[in-house]
Structure formats: C-alpha cells, structure tokens
Image: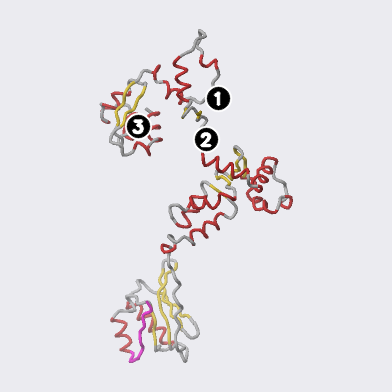
Amino acid sequence: MTALLWSIKKCHTYLAGLPHFDVVVDHRPLIPILNSKSLGEIENPRLQRMREKLSNFSFTVHWQKGSIHCIPDALSRAPVQDPTEENYLNEHGSTDPLQVAIVNALDMHEDGVLLTPLKDKTLEKIRVAAEQDAEYNSLRKIVMKGIPEHCHNLEVELRFFWNIRDMLAVDDDLIVYGARLLIPKSLRRETLECLHNGHKGIDRTKGRARQTVYWPKIDRDIENMVSSCIKCRPLLPNQWNEPLWQEEDLPSRVFESVSADYFHVMGRTYLVYIDRLSGWPCVSSCQGIASAANLIRSLRAIFSDSGVPVLLKTDGGPQFASSALRRFFISLGSRTSHYFAI
C-alpha cells in the first residue's frame, strides 16, 4: 500500500485527471481494500489514511502472481554492477527465461541501437560546449586539483569564483555550484531564454535560476534581458515618483501658515502643530480619544502662545473636517482658511 501511494504520487502528472486507470500488484489482500471497501470499512487506521489520500484517483487494482511480476520487481532493486553471463544461469547451469526477460526488459532497443544507459540530451549538449570552453576547462582542472589559498594565484578571469570556492565541485566532468550547474559561455544566452520562457518577471526568473543554473553575474544578465523584453516591458510596474509640491509664496511671518496632524507613540495619541516657515513644532498630548473637542482644546492652548494662523493645512481627517472646528474658528473671529492636503 505504501509503494502504491508513493508511485501514484510520483506519477501524479500523468495520472491526475484520467477517467480511469489500472493498477497491477502482487499482494492479494490489497484487492478488496482498494476495490470494494469504503473508508469506514477499513479497520486499520494507517491503511485508512493512505486509502483516503488515493480517493482523488479513479483506478481498479488487479492481482498478478509474483513470479510473473518481474519488471516492477526488477526495477524496485538497485543493482550494484552490470549483469554478467552468470546472472542468466540458474542453479542447474541452464538459462532461466524469467531472468532473461527481466534483463531484456531493462535493456531498451530502438532500431537495433542500445538506448541504455539513458542519456540526457541537454546535459550532453552542455558537456560538448564545456569541452570547447577554455575558461570552463581551466576552472574544472583547478577544482579537481584544489583551489589555491590566495586569490592572486588564480587567473584573472577565474577570480570571480574565489568567493564561492567552497561550493564548487565536479560531477561527471561538469562543474556544479551547490545544486546549480555552471553553464559554459556559449550556452548562456540560450539558457537565459529558457529561464525567461514564461515571462514571469525579474524576481521569479532569478528564483528559477537559483535552483538550477549559475554563471558569474547571472542576476545582472537576467535583469537586462527582462528589462529589454518587448512582451514584459508593458507589464512592468509603472510607479513614478510624485512631483514635489511647493508653495508659490512663502509665509511672511512665523505661524502664519501651519500644518497639523495626529501621531501615536507607546499607545498614546499626540497632536503635532508645525510652523511652515521656521519648522518649529508644537506637540500636545491628547487626553482620551482624538475627538474634535480634544482638538479644539489643544488648538486653543497653542493659539494662546503662537496666535491664530492664516492658513491651516491638514490631511482632512474627521476631526479637522468637523463642523465643530469650523464653529471654533468663527467664534475666534478669524479669517483662517483650512486647506486639506490629500
């Protein structure tokens, strides 16, 4: 059951969405558990949980005798060496058809050409390009031999790898940087196009590259490519800085034009009142909530020291836009104008 759950999850890309598929096992007790029993009828809690995880798939389980269930049995084992002639002979010295079938099943042929061991075309292409790259070969030799203790002992074009020297290794004649593969110069442009094939922007393209490939200054190359992409350019965020707003005429005296707003520190609310000519601040603590009544009380105390302003600028909060504040200015007999800077 554990093997079945693992294999279906492993092949999820191919099995998800299929109307139905068949599963062949060599364990007969699994047949009723997977084919006929409901979740409530399965007594074993662990089997019940695994069966629940398979409920998204529609399949039928068939039993096959273990002696003829040869291919899955062979593939489930990790051979330590290639098969020899002795593997084809049974204990009596004759050829065992079952063993021959297993070995032949693992050896795939196409038009008379042996395809095993399987070769990755992309890796073969990278390996050919690496053999023709002088810098790549020099770095590989240094990594195999041992990187010098001092940076100046390296060639100039290889000094960029000095800071990451502890993460470099050679695997099957290819240089790896951690889990990332070092790409030769001739394939970097093509690799950039593959990374940016989905047009997902700079950050996501960098994230994709940081999981698979590497070369010096790869982040800069990704930024240049995405920025110059015709399809991505119209979709880039357009966040222009707002122009700085300045007054046409400066105040003629202090506290003629002022600004006011509330701020919060350590759970308490304060009113800040600033002169726009000198920048002098006046801070008043707000007792209770920042209501219009508390605002009028604070402004009355400030006006007694600095005088009533001609122009008061705020962010248009509910306290500053209240009718109580307007009546307060009218009661003072002032001609103060109120400007909301939204």
Write the start and end of the magenta stretch as one range.
332-342
In reply to whether residue 30 is colored magenta, the answer given is: no
Mark 3 element type: helix
Specify few, some or many for label 1: CA neighbours under 10 Å numbering under 14, 14-19, or 20 or more. few
Disc 2 marks which residue? Answer: 119
Q: Are marks 1 and 3 in contact (CB under 8 Å)?
A: no
The one nearer the camera, 52 or 74, is 74
Numbered circle sitting on residue 184: none
As drawn, 28 above or below 230 = above
Foreground label between 1 and 3: 1
- Tell me how the rendering is colored: secondary structure
Q: CA distance from mark 2 to mark 3?
A: 35 Å
The residue pinned by badge 3 equals 50
Q: Position of residue 29 (x, y in %)?
A: 32, 21
Amino acid type at image mark 2 = Lys
Location of residue 127 in the rendering, given as x and y in whole percent from the top left corner:
58, 41
Q: Quadrant of the N terminus?
A: top left
Q: Residue at x 26, y 27 (%)?
A: 37
Classify 31 as above or below 207: above
> What SS does tag 2 mark?
loop
Image position of 166 with respect to 96: above or below? below
